[in-house]
């Protein structure tokens, strides 16, 4: 690994996820960020330049407007792709699906995110569950924040032989914090009309053998998502055995209400105190003292930071597609070390 050239990574879309992916790429010793592309000329693009990132126009028609706004634009999207081994598409929902044609024409490996359908790439990715099946592929889809959390937690139980069927209720934040002045919901709750909600079938796109059904409701807050889960285990187990199964995952963090972490805002504040960039919670934060076992039934709840949880998965997906690291455990360890995943302990 030490003798290999760094993976040249391009990021298309410099929004909520894109800027975090770009920062995470820069933090990896085995990766180089060749540039970021966007269509805006506001403060977000200026922040990219302030960090020294090469800035490209994702749409050639936007290049002139970006330059007129005083931005140093290095070129168009194709110019950036010509310098890269792989592109991570972080553009808004459904835009990435249109960009795929360009990536395939250029013959460049690419990653899309959970806003796109599984069929766009034919492969959906969560590092602890199916790293090996992504090796050498031309593309993959890093699943959504909620689906990532579902696969992480249910995989941990499955590895320990504690997973039968799982039923989850998701309380979904209504919008991203920076967009809350533009839309979202106020003074109401909005149930998703279908059962299962899309997250359960999405988790099965990563692991088809999961027996999982989800229900979801949008709630008028922007900090994070909250999940409640009921799992039927194949046998009776103790609480300690279940907790050990969760501890075996480096991307699940056990927290306790008894430590003052009784709400989403408290956990986010702790991330700020730990010095995480953007207060990022990369792990699933699962309440240890709320978890309950009754014979072969398991009940637990956890928090999902939708702006952060997919970032380490994206880094691992880059290594898998490029085959820069064939061992999933080794990639996860490298990513964790670079981002500080698993370094905070609240119990």
Image (tube, rainbow, N blue to C red):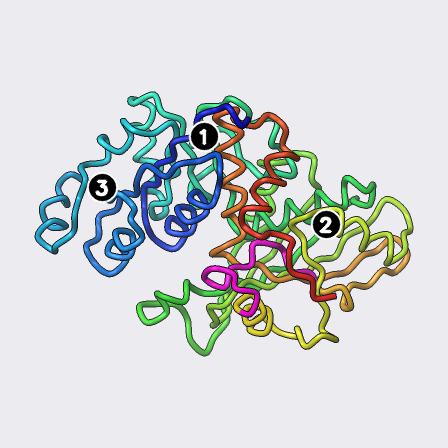
Left or right, residue 144 beside residue 65: right
Where residue 62 sits: x, y (%)?
14, 45
Which is nearer the eye, 341 or 121? 341
The image's mark for residue 56 is 3
Q: Residue at position x 12%, y 56% from top?
A: 69
Secondary structure under tag 2 reads strand
Q: Nearer the viewer, mark 2 or mark 3?
A: 3
Where residue 318 sits: x, y (%)?
48, 33
Circles 2, 1 touching at the beta carbon (< 8 Å):
no
Q: Nearer the viewer, mark 2 or mark 1?
A: 1
Looking at the image, the residue that sits furthest to the front is 3
Where residue 77 sits: x, y (%)?
23, 35
Q: Residue at position x 77%, y 53% from top?
A: 231
Circles 2, 3 touching at the beta carbon (< 8 Å):
no
**Count of labels in the image:** 3
Point out the image quarter for the C terminus: bottom right
Q: Along the polypeptide, which appears first: circle 2 or circle 1?
A: 1
Q: Residue at position x 24%, y 56% from top?
A: 46
Alpha carbon distance from label 2 to label 3: 44 Å
Alpha carbon distance from label 3 to label 1: 25 Å
Q: Which residues are magenta?
A: 273-286
- The residue that label 2 is drawn on is 166
Q: Residue at position x 83%, y 48% from top?
A: 233
Left or right, residue 132 beside residue 87: right
| In magenta segment, residue 249 | no
- The residue that label 1 is drawn on is 121
Alpha carbon distance from label 2 to label 1: 27 Å
Q: Using the image, determine if residue 104 lies above or below residue 219.
A: above
Please tell me how crowded label 3 is: few (under 14), some (14-19), or many (20+) other residues with Cα within 10 Å.
Answer: many
Secondary structure under tag 1 reads loop
Where residue 148 sits: x, y (%)?
58, 47
């Amino acid at each position: 690994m030490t003798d290999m050239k760094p993976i040249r990574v391009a990021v298309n879309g410099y929004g909520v996820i894109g800027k975090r992916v770009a920062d995470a790429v820069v933090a990896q010793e085995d990766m180089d960020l060749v540039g970021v592309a966007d269509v805006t000329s506001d403060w977000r693009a200026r922040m990219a330049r302030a960090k020294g990132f090469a800035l490209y126009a994702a749409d050639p028609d936007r290049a002139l407007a970006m330059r007129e706004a005083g931005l140093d634009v290095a070129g168009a999207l194709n110019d950036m792709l010509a310098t890269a081994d792989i592109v991570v598409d972080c553009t808004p929902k459904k835009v990435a699906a249109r960009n795929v044609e360009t990536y395939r024409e250029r013959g460049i490996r690419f990653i899309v995110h959970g806003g796109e359908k599984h069929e766009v790439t034919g492969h959906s990715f969560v590092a602890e569950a199916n790293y090996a099946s992504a090796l050498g592929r031309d593309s993959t889809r890093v699943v959504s924040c909620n689906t990532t959390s579902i696969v992480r937690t249910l995989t941990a139980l499955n590895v320990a032989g504690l997973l039968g069927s799982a039923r989850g209720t998701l309380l979904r934040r209504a919008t991203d914090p920076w967009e809350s002045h533009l839309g979202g919901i106020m003074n109401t709750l909005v149930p998703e009309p279908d059962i299962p909600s899309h997250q359960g079938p999405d988790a099965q796109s990563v692991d088809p053998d999961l027996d999982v059904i989800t229900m979801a409701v949008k709630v008028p807050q922007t900090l994070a998502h909250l999940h409640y889960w009921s799992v039927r285990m194949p046998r009776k187990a103790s609480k300690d055995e279940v907790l050990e199964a969760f501890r075996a995952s480096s991307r699940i963090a056990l927290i306790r209400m008894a430590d003052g972490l009784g709400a989403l805002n408290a956990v986010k504040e702790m991330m700020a105190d730990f010095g995480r960039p953007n207060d990022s919670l990369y792990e699933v934060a699962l309440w240890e003292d709320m978890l309950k076992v009754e014979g072969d039934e398991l009940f637990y709840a956890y928090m999902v930071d939708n702006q952060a949880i997919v970032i380490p998965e994206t880094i691992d997906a880059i290594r898998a597609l490029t085959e820069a690291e064939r061992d999933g455990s080794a990639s996860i360890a490298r990513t964790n070390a670079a981002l500080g995943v698993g370094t905070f302990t609240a119990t």
